[in-house]
Amino acid sequence: MLFRSHRLDNVLVMGVSDRIAMRRVFESKFVTQLKAAGIRAVSSAAVIPGEDKLSREAIEPEIKKLGIDAVLITHLVAVDRETVYYPPRTYIVPHAHHYYRHYYMVYDYVYEPGYYSTYKTVRLETNIFDTKTGQPIWSAQSESLDPRSAEKLMDSLIGLVISDLRQKGLL
């Protein structure tokens, strides 16, 4: 969702996570991709190291010192697990017999038992705020079905966000 047009120039990237290492990796990957897109960007972990929950008093002086015009914040919305039951199936497999031996086709019945399968959906939200007004510039939620790893999920999310920001004229 685009709130208003605002070309990004210098972005502070903040990942919200209770795992500091995950936050650092995520922010670093995002900064790398933003820089590749021609945007100046810095990770909150690089300028405010070692803090679990970043305080306003720690963030605002860094925003001013670095000339940050936008803050990008990504956080986990939910991890949902859904179990789906696939009922048993019976199907018929025809046998090829010689026509002179059988007047009618003979069929075997094959039975496939029912089974359960569990799927995990990870939902993330990314918001970008203008530092002058504090107002949102852009917001989006993403869903990933059964992500193979946190790293692949990060790469996928970052790629989607950057693509959408380009499309909206923010990059």
Image: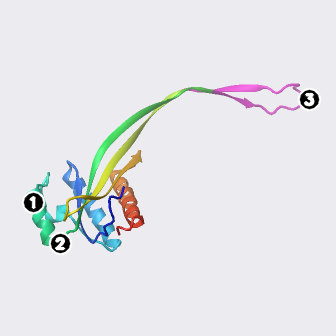
Mark 1 or mark 3: name the one nearer the start of the chain.
Answer: 1
Amino acid residing under circle 2: Gly
- Asked if residue 47 is among those painted magenta in the image, a careful observer would answer no
Q: Which residue is the site of mark 3?
A: 100
Residue 117 to residue 7: above or below: above
**Which secondary structure, mark 2?**
loop
**Disc 3 versus disc 2: nearer the observer:** 2
Pick the residue in front: 95 or 11. 11
Pick the residue in front: 25 or 39. 39
Amino acid residing under circle 3: Tyr
Mark 2 or mark 1: name the one nearer the start of the chain.
Answer: 1
- Asked if residue 110 is among those painted magenta in the image, a careful observer would answer yes
Mark 2 and 1 residues: CB-CB less than 8 Å, in contact? no
Left or right of 62 in this view: 73: right
The magenta stretch is 90-113
Q: Residues within 10 Å of mark 2 (few under 14, many from 20)?
A: some
Q: Which residue is the site of mark 1?
A: 58
Amino acid residing under circle 1: Ala
Residue 137's x, y, as percent? Answer: 29, 60
Q: Residues within 10 Å of mark 1 (few under 14, many from 20)?
A: few
Q: Which residue is the site of mark 2?
A: 67
Between marks 1 and 3, how big is the CA–CA gap?
89 Å
